[in-house]
């Protein structure tokens, strides 16, 4: 297992934790994790890489070892700003590799700040379901309700119980990998229980509607070559209600895109098939 070091940066008033798999002089790569995940989730993928890469992976605000937000809920544009300030700290341009939420952030950012991105790899970052203006009243009402009745985190008896839950959610996950993830995703409470290393406020709905047209306008400004990778067995597209034509339309927004689907992998494709994903990434970055 390739060792990493923990770096800490002051980013927009938060103490940001960044996992660094260092390789002096190698190309700079930034890994961006998904919702309710942490930077250590990329360990299996990093171990599968054959070439030398200088890898930085932040824990987003409110996750892992990074400070929780000082407000009572989280806003998507803050991820873009946090990434921008992180690149100020470590230097740019860099390759961006994002999974799920991280993929959505990377795709938006690469269109807003194209000069800071060399190449872009989007792992299962499909965007969200488009909305209509008339959805706004119901969404704001739900947001206000959740601010009053705040969500919590389910406690687990120990790390092994959390690891079992991870395997239940993803049967492709091995015992060894689930135990590793549980130790990084979870933390012990004063009661001796284990909860996820995430602010439960992440579960509060975003009051601002997702405007697909705005996201697509950003994607169209991406100048970096793009590798878009799905898991062949992903269930996310069904939850989003995206048919194949809609998925193709979203990929077509990017000017220079290569598409790949990984057999035997679901949404967590970097856990299910890290070797196959690593081969795709390295072939793309080296091209």
Image (cartoon, rainbow, N blue to C red):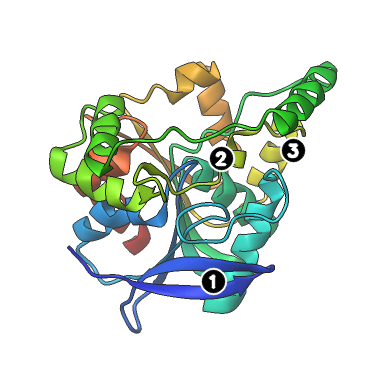
Q: Which residue is mark 2?
A: 200
Tell which circle, 1 or 3, labels the residue nearer the N-terminal end.
1
Is residue 46 found left or right of 16 in the rendered image? left
Quadrant of the image occupied by residue 21: bottom left
* Quarter occupied by the N terminus: bottom left
Image coordinates for residue 271, horizontal then vertical, percent: 27, 42
Residue at image x 52%, y 61%? 66
Q: 83 or 177: nearer the eye? A: 177
Image coordinates for residue 147, horizontal then vertical, percent: 73, 33
Q: Nearer the viewer, mark 2 or mark 3?
A: 2
Image coordinates for residue 131, horizontal then vertical, percent: 73, 22
Quadrant of the image occupied by residue 72: top right
Q: Which residue is mark 3?
A: 214
Q: Pointers 1 and 3 in contact (CB under 8 A)?
A: no
Is residue 275 found left or right of 10 in the rendered image? left
Q: Which residue is mark 1?
A: 93
What separation in Å lies between label 1 and label 2 (alpha carbons)? 33 Å
SS category of the residue bearing label 3: helix
Tell which circle, 1 or 2, labels the residue nearer the N-terminal end.
1
């Amino acid at each position: 297992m390739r060792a990493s070091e923990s770096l800490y940066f002051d980013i927009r008033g938060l103490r940001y934790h960044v996992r660094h798999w260092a390789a002096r002089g190698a190309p700079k790569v930034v890994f961006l994790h998904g919702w309710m995940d942490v930077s250590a989730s990329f360990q299996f993928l990093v171990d599968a890489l054959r070439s030398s890469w200088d890898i930085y992976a932040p824990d987003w605000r409110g996750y892992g070892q990074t400070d929780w937000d000082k407000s009572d809920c989280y806003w998507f544009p803050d991820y873009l700003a946090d990434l921008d300030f992180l690149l100020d700290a470590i230097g740019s341009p860099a390759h961006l590799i994002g999974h799920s939420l991280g993929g959505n952030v990377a795709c938006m950012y690469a269109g807003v700040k194209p000069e800071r991105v060399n190449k872009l790899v989007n792992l299962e970052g499909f965007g969200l379901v488009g909305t209509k203006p008339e959805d706004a009243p119901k969404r704001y009402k739900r947001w206000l309700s959740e601010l009053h009745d705040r969500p919590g985190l389910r406690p687990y008896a120990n790390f092994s119980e959390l690891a079992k839950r991870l395997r239940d959610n993803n049967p492709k996950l091995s015992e060894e990998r689930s135990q590793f993830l549980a130790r990084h995703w979870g933390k012990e409470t004063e009661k001796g229980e284990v909860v996820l290393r995430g602010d439960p406020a992440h579960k509060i709905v975003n009051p601002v509607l997702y405007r697909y047209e705005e996201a697509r306008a950003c994607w169209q400004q991406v100048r970096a070559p793009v590798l878009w990778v799905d898991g062949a067995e992903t269930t996310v597209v069904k939850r989003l209600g995206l048919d194949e034509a809609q998925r193709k339309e979203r990929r077509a927004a990017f000017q220079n895109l290569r598409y790949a689907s990984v057999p035997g992998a679901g949404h967590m494709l970097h856990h299910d098939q890290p070797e196959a994903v690593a081969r795709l990434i390295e072939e793309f970055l080296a091209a």
